Image (tube, grey):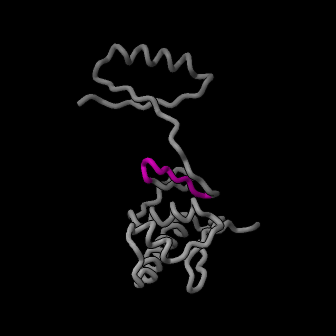
Amino acid sequence: MGRILVIEFKEQESSVFDAVMDVLKHHSNFEILKPDNEMVVSIPGLEIYPERRRIYHGRCEIDLTTKEYDLLYLLVVNKGHVLTYGQIYQNVWGEEALGNENNAVKCHIRNLRDKLYDAVPDAPFVIRCIREVGYCLEMNST
């Protein structure tokens, strides 16, 4: 299998880029991929890449489980809105909530908070618990 080379460039570097591309075209062991404009969902302190299911703080990736990622993404895209335990469970677990969803959601939120606050100790956001209702991602006011 050939090597893969991903090249990112700025407009002013296009002549250098063109020269590099000309050289690479003559070497068949490289597969050239142009980076596309991947969607990024961000809040201060975090960047989420939905297509790759990756979360970053600066250049450091935050390692999350599938459920933790899904929880965070759901909270971020609904930032400022309270989501009930049932809504969260249905969106993240993909099944109807039957009454035990609160404990599952609480456990995963606790793990998510631990990982996020370890990675971003001075986080400009908080995952707030709305007692007996659900959770809301809020930005800290400074």
**Residue 17 at x, y = what percent?**
51, 20
What residue lies at 26% left-to-right and 28% top-to-bottom? 2
Between 98 and 140, the residue placed more toward the observer is 98
**Residue 14 at x, y = what percent?**
56, 20
Between 103 and 59, the residue placed more toward the observer is 103
* Relative to 48, residue 82 above or below: below
What residue lies at 58% left-to-right and 79% top-to-bottom? 129
Q: Name the quadrant containing residue 98.
A: bottom left
24 lies left or right of 37? left
* Relative to 45, residue 9 above or below: above
13 lies left or right of 18? right
100 lies left or right of 13? left
What residue lies at 61% left-to-right and 68% top-to-bottom? 137
User: Magenta span covers which residues?
Assistant: 45-53
Q: Say which quadrant the C terminus sits in.
A: bottom right
107 lies left or right of 14? left
* Relative to 97, residue 43 above or below: above
What residue lies at 52% left-to-right and 37% top-to-bottom? 37
